[in-house]
Amino acid sequence: MPSLTGDVTPDLQFFNIIDGKIRPAKEHHQVVNPRTEEPLWDAPVASSQDLDDAVEAARRAFKTWKKTTVAERQAKIDEVARCIEKNKKLLSEILMQETGKPQMMAENEIDRTVAHFDYYLNVALEDEVQYEDEKTTVIATHVPIGVLGAISPWNFPVILSSIKVVSALATGNCVIIKPSPFTPYSLLKLCEVAQSVLPPGVFQALNGGADLGERITLHPGVDHVSFTGTIAVGRRIMENCARTFKRVILELAGNDAAVVCDDVDLARVVPLVAAGALTHAGQVCVASKRVYVHEAVYDRFLALLVDEVRKYAGHDDPSVPTPCGPISNRVNYDRLRGILDDCRKNNHDIVAGGEVLSGKKGFWITPTIVSKPPEDSFLVREEQFGPIIPLLSWSDEDDVIARANSLDNAGLGASVWTADAARAQRIARQLEAGSVWINQPELPHQGSFFSGWKLSGYGGELGRRGLLNYTNTQSLLIAK
Ligand code: NAD
């Protein structure tokens, strides 16, 4: 057991949360801390009976919860947010252990989670007049769908789960969430502490793997599903949901292009592009995964980037403030080693990094730059989800836009870097991605609708617009 401090003790226990209570499990699995490879706590595995019980409790709770007013629900969201704030130390320390994140990043994830809850204290779906004439008024009212099955990944276990939870709470849905089995602890604990302020059955959490995920998506008592993860699993979930016509939101992988023009201030822009590509060792859905730099500034950009990426090497001591830790689990670590092997096998030009620190405990890969790999190489075509940057060059605007848009897995985000505001919007508006950041690294914002196009997703979350995907809109056509 790793050395733990403060609120986090080795004998901390984790439970599935069903109907407002902790539910001890018969079966458990263990996760290792990716920084030290030391085993963490027992993680409960939910059974089929646990899922049936959670669905039954959610359906019971929904009868009352769906009738609450926006103001009543916002009061509860406020209480959950304050509860998370109060438990920040506990939750961020658990998060550090299960993801390997440095303290600064773990605390930031909890702060941003609270910010997402707080955002929905002022943003809601109220009734609206859709149409009116002398004979009729048509009102749109946004009705909760029912029981939400939410399934989340391991890279930001608290915030990505919380977006689904707060969206469900804000719209009057009940939610059962399944965290990734790589990072089950922080979310189970968050759900546990939130029970003190929420009615039983409104927010429940069950841990398990793909088999539990499948059962959630096929369960007749689950009305809709919100999923964040890979394209392959997203496709499977959509197929399963189609059988019972469950509504589905899919937030999937990205292969974001960063387009850097020749007029940028390199000293300012290179550190920002590096942050977009390497924060959390590149394990971010909207990380810059293909960096296209104008040929006129390519060599100078590369020289500055080689210096800059050293800052993302990660640090043994998690209390050192840095935006980068180890690779978060062995599966991703082995996959990334395979990508580096592929680069070497194909004689790609690795100009920085490329080292796997296998002599050291934990899953560490040094930040890597690969200069001008072929456009059809594995590193460019596929989402690397790690600290390996393919640096490509361009000289014609239409050509770089076509290359940025050429991949079906690149519909999530993109960024454009230029001193010319009109040029920035001209390029951004032609990029086929749900969010485009202009002169800033890709960081989703609670007020900004977030959706993947093409293979990167279906539906979307966040902002006021995101709440619509958690509701059925009913039209009331009222004769005057
Ligand atoms: P994953 O698809 O392997 O797993 C995600 C979740 O799905 C986990 O909880 C897993 O247990 C569950 N699951 C696996 N098989 C299932 C099945 N058959 N039915 C139901 N559930 C199943 O993804 P991951 O490796 O945890 O996450 C990394 C991926 O997520 C990357 O591709 C990344 O780009 C993407 N991601 C997307 C966003 C976004 O908002 N678009 C955000 C973060 C991560």
Image (tube, grey):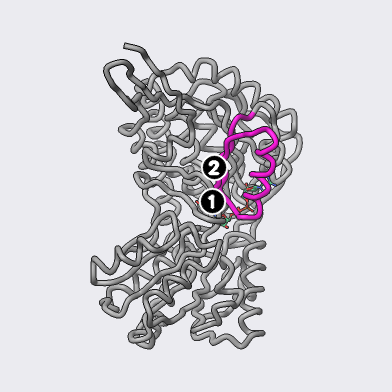
Alpha carbon of mark 1 to alpha carbon of mark 2: how far? 8 Å
Q: Circles 1 and 2: CB distance less than 8 Å?
A: yes
Residue sitting farthest toward the top: 480
Quadrant where the image shows the C terminus: top left
Question: Which residue position holds label 2?
Answer: 249
Depth check: 119 or 141 in front?
A: 141
Q: Quadrant of residue 127?
A: top left
Residue 339 x/y as whole percent: 63, 74
Cβ of disc 2 within 8 Å of ligand 1?
Answer: no
Residue at 34% of width from left, 27% of height from top?
Answer: 130
Q: Residues within 10 Å of mark 1 (few under 14, many from 20)?
A: many
Residue 186 x/y as whole percent: 54, 43
Residue 384 x/y as whole percent: 57, 68
Q: Amino acid at mark 1?
A: Gly
Depth check: 359 or 166 in front?
A: 166
Of the image marks 1 and 2, the number of the one nearer the N terminus: 2
Q: Amino acid at mark 2?
A: Ile
Q: What's drawn in magenta, residue-wise?
A: 222-251
Residue at 41% of width from left, 19% of height from top?
Answer: 476
Q: Is residue 315 visible?
A: no
